[in-house]
Amino acid sequence: MQHSTEEKILTARPVLPPIKPEILDQHTQQRLKNGLECNAVEEMLAEYLPGYCPLLMAVKAEFENCIQTIQRGNQEALYLSGKIRSMVAEQTTLSYYTRRIDQLKQIIPVIQSNNKKLHPEQMTIQMESGDHLQEIQEQVISVEVPVDNGHVNAPKRLFHGLILGESIDVEHLRKQSSSLDQQVNNLRQARKSHYTPREQKDRLKVQLATKTKAKDLVTEKNFQLKARCRKLRVALDALRVYEKDALVQPTQAEVIIHALTRSNSKMSSRSTDVLSSTFDDDDPSKEREAEMLLDYIEYFNELFGEGNYKDAAMHAASSPKGILRNSETLSRFKGISARSGKTSPLLIYCEALVSSVPAVGLLPNAETSLECVKSALVEDRLDLVMYWLAQKRLTCSEPLGHLLYNYTQGKSEDILSKGLPLAEAVYTEVDAQIQAAVCMCKQGKVQAMADYAISAGFGKDMYVGVLVACPSLALAEVLIQLRDTKGKPALSVGAVVFALLQTDSYTVGLQLLDEIHQRIKSVHFYHSQYRYGFGAMPANKRRHQESHLLVPGTSPYTAGIDMDFTTLPAQTDF
């Protein structure tokens, strides 16, 4: 009755009409649109009527204040409408909660009565299941295990580490059995490979004692034989002296004294060598050192076999006396294929090998250095090669320069700007002069190449080889103008043009001929102008003009004509 009266009161109470959000949004958008249009109109009026600009700005500010006030009012209206809606629904929600409380109060006694009815059934089921589990446990425990003498023992407890459910699960027991079998096999393998029985140790001790005793006996017998040999040698020397000096007829005492003196002098010279060799053979430190080296190699083989290439590379690079810093170790790492996306084992070994150079104090040989650079370039690690060469940790060779030069062919400008200087440095280090000059020309350092060629004493064959390898108009002009230490031209115009015409870049030779022809025409024009039109040209001015128009060392009438088309020597190819 109370709930019905509350519902009647709530329904009789007047409620505000709902506010439609669509209408409110449309109204707000229309006001904003009108405001934007008014702002645009005011800006246009301000542009056309600058005198009314203050008035228009004041109107615009007041209009914007009005728009902001309206927007705030809309926001407050939304907030108030939501608040009113929640206040209206508060009484209804409270009535629903009260009704739910009454329903739960009615359900609680029913649940309690049902629990009392179900409790005896629960106890009965638990007792039945407990008896069944007890029977299963007794069956598991009563498994008979045969032992010696025909007796049978039953385990007094379950398997260690297993609960009752696991101990009766056949699949789980099979998995546990296979796991235990694997552990047993591992222990047996470890016993064979890592451990030896005590009997073996005792047997080795007995063998060592026997060998030591036999060695002592042989050593003692050796000393006895040496002493006997010495006596026989003295007797033989005495007999020879006596037969040789038969005419003098020395006494036996003199002969024996003479033989003993000679024997002592020979034995003194031999004793040092014998003792030194004996001490070297019996030196225990050398045996210990050999054992350490063998252990070092075995440990490296273990790391390599397990696939731990990084540790194996560091172990080999820091090996004592460089026993693992050889071509065989490099070949082993080279035979391992690299995984995709990971550094190859060969590059890992090369990095370890080169990084250990300061500690070892020994550079890798030329072949090993070449393989190290190859492994780095295969993975585009030119930065690593730059660091190695900058730190002088590689042995430079001409094949190494060829490798760097060929790597830059067809690559981007960035690779060219880094690889060609490296090749140039290697060629300069090994005194490969033509290749170094070609690298300079490839970098555009033509004048630096000319200075290097003069200092190195290039011949005509070497200049032609550089020109054929790097045909360019700038290089051709420099070679024509170049003078050696004796003042002679490096190459004649004819030799340069002939060399260029023999290559695929014959257009460079044609450009050179055309440029020389234009210079000749310009010189002829200046001479004819000053000879027939404006009088003689002063000598200093004429020389100045010729120096700008002609190739130095040629005359106005012989430039480009005095060409030497003799057969050129073979070109240098690398």
Image (cartoon, rainbow, N blue to C red):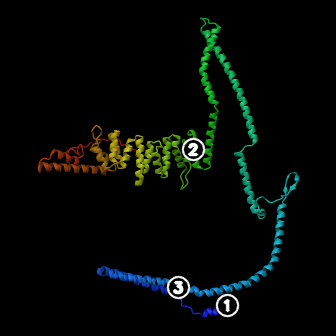
Which residue is painted at 58% across and 86% down in the image? 87
Q: Secondary structure at mark 2?
A: helix
Q: Secondary structure at mark 3?
A: helix
Residue contact at pointers 3 and 2, CB within 8 angstroms: no
| Kind of residue indicated by mark 1 | His
Residue 211 in the image, given as x and y percentages of width and height: 72, 32
Residue drawn at 37 percent across, 46 percent down: 438
Q: Amino acid at mark 2?
A: Ala
Image location of residue 202, percent across then percent down: 75, 38
Marks 1 and 3 sit apart, C-alpha to C-alpha, by 29 Å
- Residue 279 screen position, x and y as percent: 63, 28
Whether residue 204 sits left or right of residue 439 in the image: it is right
- Nearest the camera: 562 or 59? 59
For disc 1, the neighbor class at 10 Å (few under 14, some 14 to 19, many from 20) is few
Disc with the residue nearer the chain's start (3 vs 2) = 3
Specify whether 123 is left or right of 490. right
Residue at x-position 60% and y-position 45%: 300
Q: Which quadrant would residue 18 be assigned to in this image?
A: bottom right
**Image check: 17 left or right of 429?**
right
- What number is the disc on residue 3? 1
Q: Is residue 90 above or below residue 570?
A: below
Residue ID for mark 2: 316
Foreground mark, 3 or 2?
3
Task: Indicate which disc, 1 or 3, sits on the residue closer to the N terminus.
Answer: 1
Which disc number belongs to residue 80?
A: 3
Horizontal and vertical percent position of residue 375:
50, 49
| Residue extending furthest toward the right | 150
Q: CA distance from mark 3 to mark 2?
A: 82 Å
